[in-house]
Structure formats: C-alpha cells, structure tokens
Amino acid sequence: MFPPRCIACGAGVAADFGLCPECWRETPFASGLVCDKCGAPLPGVDEGKPEYCDDCLTIARPWQRGRAALVYKDTARRLVLAFKHGDRLDLRRPLADWMARAAAPLLEPGMVLAPVPLHRLRLIKRRYNQSALLSGEVARSAGLTHVADLMQRTRATPSQEGLHRDARFANLAGAVRVNPRRADLLAGRHVLLVDDVMTSGATFAACADACLAAGAENVSVLALARVAKDA
C-alpha cells in the first residue's frame, strides 16, 4: 500500500528494505579482504587465505573466526544507532540479511547461534535485546539452531562506551556465564556469538571464554558493525 522507502533516509527506492543510491555509497560494507578473526577491513586483495589485523595479531582471541557486515561509521553508524536506541525494529530484516551474507564463510551444519546477553535491568529499560533479534534472523535464514538465552549477564556492568581497551576487558571480568539450563546444548558444538557492534572484542571474549569453559568445541563471532581504527 505504500511505496518502498530507503531504510536510512526515506527516499523512494525500487524495493522494500533497500538503500537509495546516495545512502548506499555512504554505507561502508566490510567486504573484500578482511581480518579472519574480527572482520575488520584490510588493505590488499583477498587471495583466499586467512589474514589478520594488528589487534588480532597482538591480542589473544578465544574465538576461532569472525566477521562483520559493516564498518561502524557514516550511514552504517546511523542505522546501528537507530536500530539499537531508536526503536527501528523494521531494520532487523535488512541488517540481518547483510550479516548472513558476511557470515557465510563461518556457517556450518550443527552450529548454534546465540546473542551477546543484556543484563535484565538494561533489558527492562531498552525492552529488547537487539543482538537477539539479529541472531534469530540470521539463524532462521541459515536453518541453524538459535538459543536466545544461552548466555547470561551475572551483574550489571557500566557501559563500555568511552573506555580504553584494558578497561573494557576488566569491566567484563566475571560478568558473563552460560545459562545453566542451556549448558547441555554446548557439548561438542560450534557456537556463533552475535552482537551489534564490536570495538575491542572484550564482550565477545568474555562470552567465548564462558562457552568454551562450558564445553563448546569452537566459538566464532559475528557483528553487525566493526569499529575500525581508520573509520
């Protein structure tokens, strides 16, 4: 009943859930050669072998592989913030579609998808876990198991925003665990953890450590957007 509109600016487009040409040009997709651990864009040409960014060469990552759909800047940043804080739940489908394409090299039969958890107080305030909405859509499109409550926040941590790298890791120490009621789903399984934004990787690291301690065989990570140093 209504003509399709650009999900970023509202201009007319040819199909639902699309971007107009101008917004498309201003949306930095994490494509081409990317870090195999975190999905950050890298200079050079993709020759089909794993390459790694400086952070992933110097920081021990407890997960196996990682990807991101977008670089966190320009139109991508506006879309992430609109979805996360602006009640733009209509963005769930197109954002998850982009994530599913980025995650293609990671997906495998029998994989379990799970979102990074919110503490219950933050969930009450926000009313939804944006990462759970995205992980559910990606799992559905890939035909894989989704466990929305696999992970739990055991304490309310301060926001990671504005913290330097070491403080981000310290902030999450002991703050995440596997839901005891779901631990039996992890034995020998490969888990794909899903979050909206990856900055230092501290949140993914805390969740991955918890999954591995609970019996997961491998962990990979998928972010909607990756904060890149040159962004």
Image (cartoon, rainbow, N blue to C red):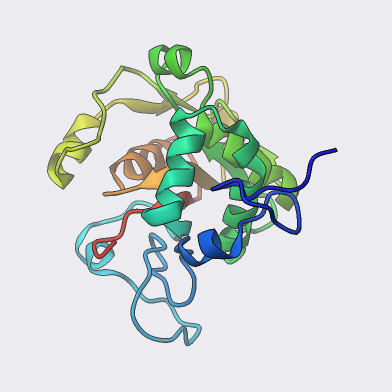
- Relative vertical location of residue 83 with respect to residue 72 in this rendering, above or below: above
- Relative vertical location of residue 130 with respect to residue 23 in this rendering, above or below: above
In the image, 178 versus 168, the foreground residue is 168
Taking the image as drawn, is residue 111 in sight?
Answer: no
- Splitting the image into 4 quarters, where does residue 156 fall? top left
Taking the image as drawn, is residue 131 in sight?
Answer: yes
- Splitting the image into 4 quarters, where does residue 185 fall? top right
In the image, 137 versus 172, the foreground residue is 137
Residue 27, image x, y percentages? 48, 60
Instruction: State which quarter of the image contains the N terminus.
Output: top right
- Tell which residue pokes out farthest to the right in this image: 1
Q: Could you tell me which residue is drawn at 25 percent across and 56 percent down?
A: 60
In the image, 38 versus 112, the foreground residue is 38
Q: Is residue 74 left or right of residue 179?
A: left
Residue 172, image x, y percentages? 26, 31
Q: Could you tell me which residue is drawn at 20 percent across and 38 percent down?
A: 168
Tally the numbered discs: 0
Q: Is residue 191 left or right of residue 208?
A: right
Instruction: State which quarter of the image contains the C terminus.
Output: bottom left
- Relative vertical location of residue 140 with respect to residue 15 in this rendering, above or below: above
Q: Is residue 115 left or right of residue 40?
A: right
Q: Could you tell me which residue is drawn at 48 percent across and 64 percent down?
A: 29
Residue 9, image x, y percentages? 55, 47
Q: Is residue 156 left or right of residue 166?
A: right
Q: Could you tell me which residue is drawn at 55 percent across and 25 percent down?
A: 149
- Splitting the image into 4 quarters, where does residue 176 fall? top left
Residue 150, image x, y percentages? 54, 29
